[in-house]
Structures are given as C-alpha cells and as structure tokens.
Image: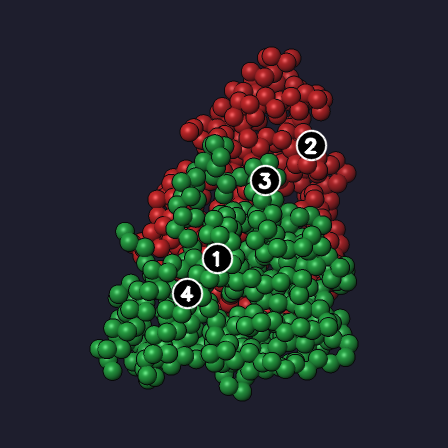
Chain colours: A green, B red
Amino acid sequence: MKRAYNFNAGPSAMPEEVLKEAQAEFLNYQDTGMGIIEMSHRSKEYDAMHQETKALLRELMEIPENYEILFIQGGGSTQFMMTAANFLKKKAAYVNTGVWAKKAMAEAKFFGEAYEAASSADRNHCYIPQEFDIQPDTDYVHLTANNTIYGTEYPDFPKFDIPVICDMSSDILSRRVNVSDFDLIYAGAQKNLGPAGVVIVIVKKEFLAAARTELPTMLKYSTFAEKDSLYNTPPVFAIYMVNKTLHWIKNQGGVDAVAANNQAKASLIYDVIDNSNGFYKGHADKAYRSLMNITFNLATPELEKDFIEKGKAAGFIGINGHRSVGGCRASTYNAVPMEACAALAEFMKQYQKEHE
Amino acid sequence: MKRAYNFNAGPSAMPEEVLKEAQAEFLNYQDTGMGIIEMSHRSKEYDAMHQETKALLRELMEIPENYEILFIQGGGSTQFMMTAANFLKKKAAYVNTGVWAKKAMAEAKFFGEAYEAASSADRNHCYIPQEFDIQPDTDYVHLTANNTIYGTEYPDFPKFDIPVICDMSSDILSRRVNVSDFDLIYAGAQKNLGPAGVVIVIVKKEFLAAARTELPTMLKYSTFAEKDSLYNTPPVFAIYMVNKTLHWIKNQGGVDAVAANNQAKASLIYDVIDNSNGFYKGHADKAYRSLMNITFNLATPELEKDFIEKGKAAGFIGINGHRSVGGCRASTYNAVPMEACAALAEFMKQYQKEHE
C-alpha cells in the first residue's frame, strides 16, 4: 500500500522510518521479550529511553542546563490551565492571535486577571501583532508561536522584559528558536514531535521557583520537575514515539536542516498560490505566513468543497480548513515529505487549469 | 523470541493477539495508507473506532444508558483531583485501604473537607474494612477497589446511601461489577485495559448534573461529556489499544470467562503460598486477597532479593514488591497468560525446595 499524502493538522503524519522501527520492535523491545508499551516505567529499559529523550531534545533545541524538560498529559488545553495556575498571581498578558490564544486566556481568568496585550482579531488573525501593551505588575506574557487555524507564525519573536510563556505546539523543532528568550515553552507532541498523548514542557528553573505552591499535585509543574515526570505513570508509548522522532530529526541533520526543508516544502505550495492570479487566495499576510499550516481559499465555498473532495479522491488527506473557519489548509509539519508537497502543488496547478 | 513472563504491576502485559494486530496495521489502518497514530481525531475512521470502543465497554460491563463513558488523560492521580474538584462541596468520605486511597484523600482537601470513613492502616492494609463511619452532609464516599501494593481487593462492594466513587484502575473488567451501584468509576488503562495514557471514566448522568460548574475547562467532567471526549485531541493510540483489548476480552467469552480464568491463575500461585509451610507468607488476609496482585514475603529481605534475582534470570519480570513496601508481588492482570502463572508457581516450588 502506498503511503497517503497526509496533510492532517494534528494528529498528523509521522516519518515512515519512525513507524517502521516502532513496528519492528512492537512485541520485543531490545530483546526483553515484551513491547515497550507493556513495560514498567520503573524498569531500567524505560528509564534509559526516558533520559535519552530528554538528552536528545536538549541537544537538538540547545536547551540550557537551567531549564527542566517535562512530559505531561492532557494536551495544550491542560497547559492553558497549568501555566496560569502556576504563574498568574496578579495579572497576565495574552497576545490574541486566534482561537487557541483566546482559549489560553479564558483559562487564565480562573487564577487572576488576564488581559489582551495585542490582538489580530480586526483582520481575522491574518497577521501577527508587532506592538504590545504590557501593563505594570504583569506576571508573564503568553504567545502562540504558530496559529494552525489561520496559518500565521511569528517570523521573529518579540522581546519583553517580563517572563514569556509560549505555546509552540504546532511549530516546535520546525525551526531554530533561542530557548533562553522564553521562561516556559509547551508543545503537544502530535504535530511535529510524535503522537497525541504527551506535551513537552521546557521551563526555566528560576521561573519555576516562583510558581504558586498551594495547588493540587497534578497541577503543579514542580511535581513533574521533582520526580523527573515520573510522579505517576507517564504515557510510555507516546514518549517512546517522541524519542524515535527526535532521532529522526537528528538524522535529518538537526533543526536547521529540517527548517530548510520545511521552507522548501512550504514554498512549493505558496508559489502555486502566489502564481495563481487569485484563483487561490492565501489567508495570511505574506510576512507572517506559517511554514506549518498553509491556509487558502478558492472563489466560493462550493468550489472549495469540490477542491477538497477531488483532492481526497487523488489521495490528499486533511486539506480541509479547520471546522471553525472553513476554506482549505495543508499542514506541512516536519514529517510531511517533500514529495507530498510537490504532488499537492502539482494537483493545485492542474485543478486550477480545469476550473478557471 | 519467546515472550517474557511479564508480571509488571503497570504498565503491564498486553495480550499477544492484540499486539500482533496493532503491529500488522501500524502503518496502514483500514487501507487508509496511514497508521491510526497519524490520523485526525476528526476523521470518520477515528470516530468509528472511538464510538465502537464505548459501545464495547458498555456491552462488556453492562453499563446502563444513563451513564456517560469518558476518555481522560493524566492517570488516576488526575482523577484524585477531578473527582473532588467536581463533587466535593461540603465533605467527602475516604476509605483508607492504602497509599493510593490516601493520595486520593490528600487531593480532596483542596476542595473541601475530606475524612477517613474507615482505615486498614492498623495492620498495614492487609484487609478491607467492613464498617464505615459516614458523617451527615457527606457528598460521596471514595473507594479503591483493588490495592496493588498490598494485594487486597473488595470481595463484595459495601452499599451506601450516598454517592459512591470508585477507583477501579487495577481490577476493571477483571470480574463482574454492578455499575449501577456506583456514581462514578475511574480506571487508568495500563493494567487491565491497554497502555498508559488514558483513563476510562464511567459516570452517572444525574450525578454529573450536580457537579461544580465554576472550574477550568479541563477539570470539568462536563467538558468531556458534552464533547464526547473530543473537546481537545484525545490520546488516539491509547484509545485504539483499549479498543483492541476490549475485543479480546469479548473473544475470551466476556467478563465472566475472564474472571474465571483470573481466579484459576491466581489460585495456582496462592496455592503454592498456602502449601509452603510458611516459606512464602501471603501479605493479605485470605478473605480480601486480590486476584490481580499477589503479594508475599520470604523469611528475610536478603532471601527476597535472591528470589527476585533468580526469578528474573529465569524470565519472570516484575516480581519485586512496590518500592514503598518491598517484598514480592506477582501481578496477574487479565492479559497475563495461565502459562506464565503456572511457570511462576513451578518456579516458586522449585525455589523453596532449593532454599528451605
């Protein structure tokens, strides 16, 4: 069976090599006579993998030693709550770049005052704000690095003189970032890092030391930091798939090589949009275009529906827009191969010829 | 490679047939050209599997229609917090049958008053209390059905005239229970149901309607109930493995057949203990012995260490006791085959002969 052209927005394509490796050892991990999915999280085999996963992430992202790396369940939505529960004492600033940023801000209100430091709502989030209104006594500013629904991404991150929390769920390890510019980074694995079921949290130790202490055990980052994410049973298999994905990124040449590839992949599709004389209309302003989620419209919702259906019939999966906004979207995360992007670009050109 | 004799306490053995099926379709689920681990949780293929998983659980446990079935991340420890966050308004009663019950009670204190309705601490939790002191205005009583560390299990569940919340993480689907006797049941999957990374919650709709409403989104059971556990991305692969495990239970003949098998498996090992003239000393009182976790001691910690080491060399994995209590433990969850229990019983007899 040929691999599908998988443009799903998340959960999303995983590298074929990673899947084949996991498949081969599914019932017998390192000659133990059992799969890692059946293995105690207190076993030496699991522990070695757990530690290696952290070391690989530290190496690939050049995470300084004064940052903890944590594995937490519950998705980005649980992080919306945890970030505020731990760090919002007086007030927190949120940059509203779309639905997910707004959801993060809504959860913050359970723990203190949360206000909009900037917003791109005036033009349906087709850009990233460049000016920020930070009030005195603000505990942190929260950013959403990449906005999957609108296809926007911070080209460079703004600098602040207060702590910065950043949701990198949809572009972590897709490009180089300077971890030291952030106090806490979180990212659900199911786009660039592996399967759904685990969130990576990277948090500066000095920032963590200032967290609220009177919280239920599972809401405290310190629970995870103090017990190396093994306070309770971690999502063993999800972490294992992250481990394999990190090896794969390293084998590709690391983050810079992957970033160059992502740029080339996205360009294939953006070029079709830009050269279509308006047949395809990109949603995001060019300066803020995401390399991960390419969002575009056709002339009418009917034409979009037809495009998506014909695309699906031709093997392109997941090219519908988010249910909240419609339109079309191709998610070109790390593991989506160049070949799939080239095939989609070709399909788009052909479709335009036939429907113009 | 021969399968290991896997007696891990959790994550734990999974049925070989389940693993082989998942392995075979790891890169190509239902001819989609992709693995289910890469698939959108909004796809029709995922949705069909999600619905089937709930239907299978409902059928196997005979869950009445006025109960919701939810999939939540974060393990039992997150349920300790969520149960109290949603349902503890004045006070709640906890039956202290060991470490996990105490942890549940500790989290409850963030949301209201939590008191011990009974305790087995006087004899290191080797039995299940039979009398309960329930105070007026108690919102619910919390039970731990099976106590993995001590190897005790409720033979029958007591009846209460207030709501009952029960942690069935380590014995769900190992035997028949009457779901109607409970208002909320929760169970981490990683013992009898599948891999780590998902908790099954079964909650009576009338009880859910009384839950606290002013809570962060991810702490509210209603978020999961209203969105069919798809408010955010669920742990797709973990749920898929639960699905396969439920099919396997059904193919074994359902819960009663599995329960009879569990009884026979545990008897093989308990019989060795009981006929060892005290060489092996069972920890739990006979009336409260668990069919899932068989706990025992040898004469000295040194002898226990030797037994565990020689056992490991002979292929028996995970027969050490919990790090908090020491001793020996064999976890004989649903998926541990009769053959493994027979082999362990034989090994124990042989070991006794050689060391008596």
Q: Secondary structure at mark 3?
A: helix
Q: Secondary structure at mark 4?
A: helix
The residue that mark 3 highlights is A48
What is the three-letter code of the residue carrying label 2?
Answer: Gly
The residue that mark 4 highlights is A264
Chain designation of label 2: B
Q: Residue B224 location, x and y as percent?
A: 53, 65
Answer whether labels 2 and 4 touch (C-beta < 8 Å).
Answer: no
The residue that mark 2 highlights is B326
Chain designation of label 3: A
In screen coordinates, is A313 left or right of B334?
left
The mark closer to the camera, 2 or 3, is 3
- What residue is at 44 percent from the left and 61 percent from the top? A261
Looking at marks 1 and 3 on the same chain, the residue that comes earlier in the sequence is marked by: 3
Looking at marks 3 and 4 on the same chain, the residue that comes earlier in the sequence is marked by: 3
What is the three-letter code of the residue carrying label 3?
Answer: Ala
Mark 2: few/some/many CA within 10 Å (<14, 14-19, 20+): some
Mark 1 to mark 3: distance in Å? 27 Å
The residue that mark 1 highlights is A257
Mark 3: few/some/many CA within 10 Å (<14, 14-19, 20+): few
